[in-house]
Image: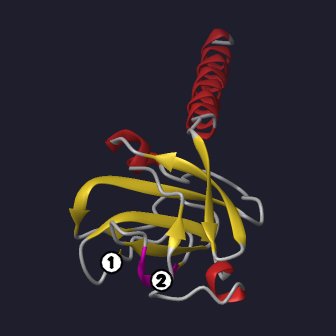
Amino acid sequence: MALFPRYFRMAAGCLALAASSIALAQQATKFPVISLNAGMYVIRAEVAARDAERQQGLMFREKMGANEGMVFLFEAPAGVCMWMKNTLIPLSVAFIDENGQIVNIEDMQPQTLDSHCARKPVRYALEMNQGWFKSKNIKPGMRIEGLPR
């Protein structure tokens, strides 16, 4: 009888270890980093260019530096929507056309499934800490320089 509870404690311990390993693997995803310019501001942007990278995005991150973000690169201009499943920090997203011009900017709340969509087909989406664009007076119609092709 004493073996039975010990088995469950060991199994629970193994499950906890497996779960923490999965969470660590999700957080440990490394993306290439580039520098972008928004007016006089330099952004250190991780690049999500493949489907799996775009699906992972900034999920499970607990914080992001003041001028850090993630740029999502799409193969061709498309109708793009973003959401915040498993994303722990509030973000603002700028939808950007193939010429680097910001189409629209949307604020997104953590851990929600609300869709935030580009108003026309875009080639890029740039996620920054929520309020970053507003605090820098960066608005639709302005350009982001240094985007990957």
Q: Nearer the viewer, residue 116 or 25?
A: 116
Viewer-side residue, 24 vs 91: 91
Residue range (magenta): 101-107
**Mark carried by residue 23:** none
Depicted 29 relative to depicted 130: above or below: above
Which of disc 2 and disc 1 is earlier in sequence?
2
| Quarter residue 89 falls in | bottom right
Q: Main secondary structure of the magenta part?
A: strand
Q: Residues within 10 Å of mark 1 (few under 14, many from 20)?
A: many
Query: Which residue corresponds to mark 1?
Result: 117
Residue type of the residue flagged with mark 1 = Cys
Residue 49 is left or right of residue 120, and the answer is right
Task: Check disc 2: other Cα within 10 Å, few if <14, some if 14-19, many if 20+.
Answer: some
Residue 104 lies in the magenta stretch: yes
- Rendered residue at 45%/50% (across/down): 148
Q: Which residue appears farthest toward the right when viewing the image?
A: 66
Badge 2 element: strand
Tally of numbered discs: 2
Above or below: residue 54 compared with residue 132: above
Tell me where residue 140 appears, x and y as whole percent.
46, 88
Residue that mark 2 sits on: 106
Residue 63: where, in percent of width, then height? Answer: 73, 58
Image quadrant in which the N terminus is located: top right
Task: Tell me residue 141's x, y (percent).
Answer: 44, 87
> How far apart, in angstroms, are the residues tagged by discs 1 and 2?
8 Å
